[in-house]
Structure formats: C-alpha cells, structure tokens
Image: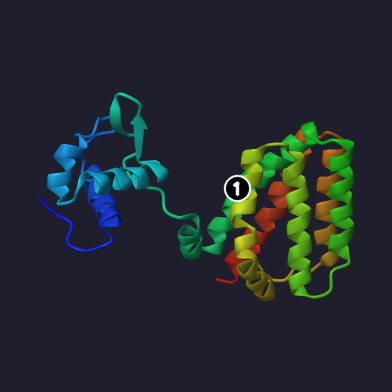
Amino acid sequence: MSQVRRAPLADQAAELLLERIRAGEWPLGAKLPGETTLGPQLGVGRSTVREAIRQLAGRGVLATRQGAGVFVTALDATEDWDVVLRRTDILSVIEARIAIESEAAALAAVRRTPQDLRAIRRALSQREGHSGLDDYVDADMRFHRAVVTAAHNPILLELFDGFVPRLREAMIEMLRINQPKDGDTDHGAHAQLVEAIAEHDVTGAGQASREHLEQLKVGLEGQR
C-alpha cells in the first residue's frame, strides 16, 4: 500500500485517495472507510485525513453526510479552469463559444428587457468606434457579454465570464492572423443579431450568433 512520504501531508494524502478512487477501489456512491482505517493506510494522522477529505470535497470528488460518513461523488477531480484553458486549442474555445452564445442569443430574444436591448445596442455602437486590435477585441467582448447577460441565465454568464476574458490575448493573436476582410459585413452580422433579439426572433437570434462564430472558426481553420 502506497504511503505519504513528503510534505505537505494533506496534499499528498488527498492525491493518494484520488488515485485509489480513479483505480476503482471505491465506486461512485461508495462510502469511504473511517479516519482510523484510512490514517494508517496513508501513513498520516486523523487530522490529516480530515484535511485531505476536505480538499477532495472541495474538488467535487467526496461529500461528507452528517452522521452517515464520507461518500464518493465523482470518479475524478475536475481540473482547475486556468489549467484547462492554458492547454485549450483556440478552435475548441470558439466551439464552446458557439454552444454558449447561440443558446444565450436565443434566450435573449425571449427574455431581454428594454434595458437589456439598450445595453446591447450601445455595445454594438461602441464596437464600431474601436481604434486598434486590442480595443476591438475588448469592445467585441463587451457586445457579446451584453447578449449573454440578456439571456438572464447566470450559468451561461458565468461560463462566458470564466473563459472568454482569460483568452483575450489568444483572440487578439487569432485576429492578427485572420482579421475580418470586410468590416461592413462583420458589423452587419452583429446588427442582424441585435435586430433578431429586438424582434423576439428566437431562431434568427440563435442562427445569427452561430453563423458569426462559425465564420471565425472557418477562418482560423484556413490558417492551419
């Protein structure tokens, strides 16, 4: 049985527990042995076991149920968002944006308020007046965020906020390689999205969002 050999003990204990879960020692929903059993197996004290369990609970792998024990709630830990993004291909990001933003646009067509629509129109206007690529990307993000905000779905907004701003530099670099050849057409595509949302055109809004981002994807693929 592998044991902890170096500090920090709680981190090492958590990783050993996770390895055993990944290996199938405890299936999904299984109850872990008690601290007095796990401690000797891992070569640590009960307080270290408790801290290791807290760590894995925070990563979604374990859950402590009052009076019942500790149970396996996932067979692996999700990676830190920043780590995932550092490894992510920009094409994968655009595909994720298509999934998030086309749905958000469709929902915005249903749920947008007059205030939302004013914010979207204002962001569209500001997007036209950019000076330089950095400003353009920032203005574009503000526009797309206004659309996602108008969907009134906090999960979609959190997903958007979680990865789009963190990939700002990648988006700038992508556009340096593949700038829109026709600024009027690009602006027109965004204006079409705004009008679909204004007219409560659910299908049109989702389609306009998807088609715009698909063009980005196609353009990037052409550079490979």
150 and 32: which is toward the camera? 32
Residue 131 lies, with reference to residue 60, above or below; the image says below
Q: Which image quadrant: the C terminus?
A: bottom right
65 and 77: which is toward the camera? 65
Query: How dense is the environment of label 1, judged by Cα within 10 Å: few (below 14), some, or many (20 and up)?
Result: some
Q: Position of residue 114 (x, y in %)?
A: 89, 37
Can you tell which quarter of the image residue 58 is in?
top left
Q: Is residue 147 visible?
A: yes
Residue 50 vs residue 144: left or right?
left
Residue placed at 84% from the left, 55% from the top?
123
Residue 136 vs residue 20: left or right?
right
Dot 1 corresponds to which residue?
Answer: 159
Residue placed at 22% from the left, 44% from the top?
46
Can you tell which quarter of the image residue 143 is in?
bottom right
Please give the count of numbered marks on the rendered protein. 1
Q: Is residue 73 visible?
A: no
Q: Secondary structure at mark 1?
A: helix
Q: Position of residue 159 (x, y in %)?
A: 60, 47
Residue 21 lies, with reference to residue 222, above or below; the image says above
92 and 82: which is toward the camera? 82
Q: Residue furthest left?
A: 1
Q: Amino acid at mark 1?
A: Leu
Residue placed at 59% from the left, 53% from the top?
162
Q: Position of residue 173 (x, y in %)?
A: 64, 73
Residue 204 vs residue 167: left or right?
right
Residue placed at 64% from the left, 42% from the top?
156
Q: Position of residue 94 (x, y in %)?
A: 60, 56
